[in-house]
């Protein structure tokens, strides 16, 4: 990623009040972009959006992507060059409780964003964030490629597969590469999952649930300790999104289509390993126990992405090993507990990630303990 590219770029970001959206909003502010966010109120209390005062460096509009007219007018008034669509109902377990809401936000919300783009002449680049769960999961031990079948057992996964089809339809019908000189819009979708980092308070997510228990001195309950996931720090896929947006902007539809952003095999671990490591990093005597509740909704036990396309064509590679990722998360959470200024702390983690993301080393040159010490 070229930092200078983003200086002064006009970026319209949906979902900016959420966990990933807040991290990306701060990163774009660090880079000097002019940002307008469009999203519902922060989905949790506390929230990274409020703690890090994300709205201070951008234009923040509270709105619903299901409301096409307001979305379209807001986008047209702002005249963005780049649109990054992140607004979503992002939780598998909630999708069972609210399937209509999930499909309305994730599918029709995507339709509305793309329709608004179609009527906003300033837009040149579109990055549409879906999910690794858009694939038809067959519990393969090898990674899914961008050409594999879409599907979805649960409403969330199904809605993300549908969102991919919506994006493909708009690309074929309105933003076709063969007529790029007429519309000047390059559109790509991205697929990533099991993203973790400081400031996530979403319900029914493993790492936030563990941290809540640790902060409260409670025993950690784990639903599926042997489930295996490819874990990655939130800044890893965000780095991929920014790199992709640059390529779409400068080289057009050659970088359209779908893209996977996931961790290396070394970052694939069981839920129990994550719980053990977080409990150890917390420096306490707390441990985890298996949740005795048996009435759990279906959740996939294994899903891995093949990221060869992003590595070969974008030069993107994950930079943080899993132990460092978890250390950064614990550091962030303890800094929050200690009353640090969390906008500054979060920006420091972004700055340090930027420094070593251009390095060939897989691990950071500055340890998480040194990062916390900067605030002492």
Image (cartoon, rainbow, N blue to C red):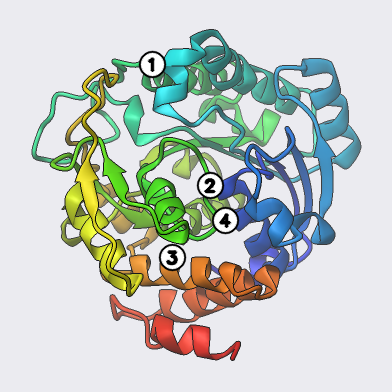
Q: Mark 2 points at which residue?
A: 201
**If you read the primary sequence from the N terminus, does the residue marked by circle 4 or circle 2 appear first?**
2
Q: Which residue is drawn at 63% across and 41% down?
A: 44
Q: Residues within 10 Å of mark 4 (few under 14, many from 20)?
A: many
All told, the count of numbered labels is 4
Rendered image: mark on residue 158: 1
| C-alpha separation, residue under disc 4 versus residue under disc 2 | 30 Å
- On screen, residue 260 versus residue 255, left or right, reads left
Query: Which secondary structure, mark 2?
Result: loop
Classify residue 170 as left or right of residue 309: right
Crowding at label 1, few (<14), some or many (≥20) Cα neighbours within 10 Å? Answer: many
Give SS at disc 1: helix
The secondary element bearing badge 3 is classed as helix
Q: In which quarter of the image is residue 104?
A: top right
Q: Name the residue under label 4.
A: 246
Tell whether label 1 touches label 4 (CB within 8 Å).
Answer: no
Q: In this view, does 259 lie above or below 105?
A: below
């Amino acid at each position: 990623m070229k930092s200078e590219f983003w200086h002064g770029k006009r970026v319209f970001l949906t979902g900016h009040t959420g966990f990933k959206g807040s991290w990306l909003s701060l990163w774009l502010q660090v880079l000097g972009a002019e940002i307008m966010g469009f999203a519902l109120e922060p989905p949790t209390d506390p929230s990274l959006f409020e703690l890090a005062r994300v709205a201070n460096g951008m234009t923040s509009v509270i709105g619903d992507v299901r409301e096409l007219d307001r979305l379209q007018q807001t986008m047209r008034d702002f005249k963005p060059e780049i649109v990054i669509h992140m607004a979503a109902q992002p939780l598998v377990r909630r999708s069972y409780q609210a399937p209509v809401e999930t499909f309305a936000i994730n599918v029709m919300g995507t339709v509305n964003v793309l329709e608004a783009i179609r009527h906003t002449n300033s837009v040149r680049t579109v990055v549409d964030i879906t999910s690794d769960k858009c694939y038809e999961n067959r519990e393969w031990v090898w990674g899914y490629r961008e050409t594999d079948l879409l599907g979805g057992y649960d409403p969330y996964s199904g809605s993300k597969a549908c969102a991919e089809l919506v994006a493909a339809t708009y690309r074929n019908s309105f933003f076709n590469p063969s007529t790029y000189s007429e519309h000047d819009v390059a559109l790509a979708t991205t697929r990533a999952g099991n993203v973790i980092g400081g400031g996530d308070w979403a319900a029914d997510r493993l790492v936030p649930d563990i941290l809540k228990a640790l902060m409260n001195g409670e025993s950690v309950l784990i639903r599926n300790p042997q489930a295996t996931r490819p874990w990655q720090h939130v800044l890893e896929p965000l780095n991929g999104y920014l790199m992709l947006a640059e390529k779409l902007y400068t080289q057009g539809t050659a970088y359209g289509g779908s893209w996977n952003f996931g961790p290396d095999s070394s970052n694939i671990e069981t839920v129990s390993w994550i719980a053990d490591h977080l409990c150890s990093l917390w420096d306490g005597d707390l441990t985890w126990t298996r949740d005795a509740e048996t009435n759990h909704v279906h959740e996939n036990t294994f899903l891995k992405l093949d990221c060869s396309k992003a590595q070969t064509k974008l030069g993107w590679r994950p930079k943080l090993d899993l132990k460092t990722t978890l250390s950064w998360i614990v550091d962030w959470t303890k800094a929050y507990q200690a009353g640090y200024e969390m906008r500054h702390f979060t920006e420091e983690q972004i700055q340090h990630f930027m420094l070593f993301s251009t390095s060939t080393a897989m691990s950071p040159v500055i340890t998480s303990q040194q990062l916390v010490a900067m605030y002492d």
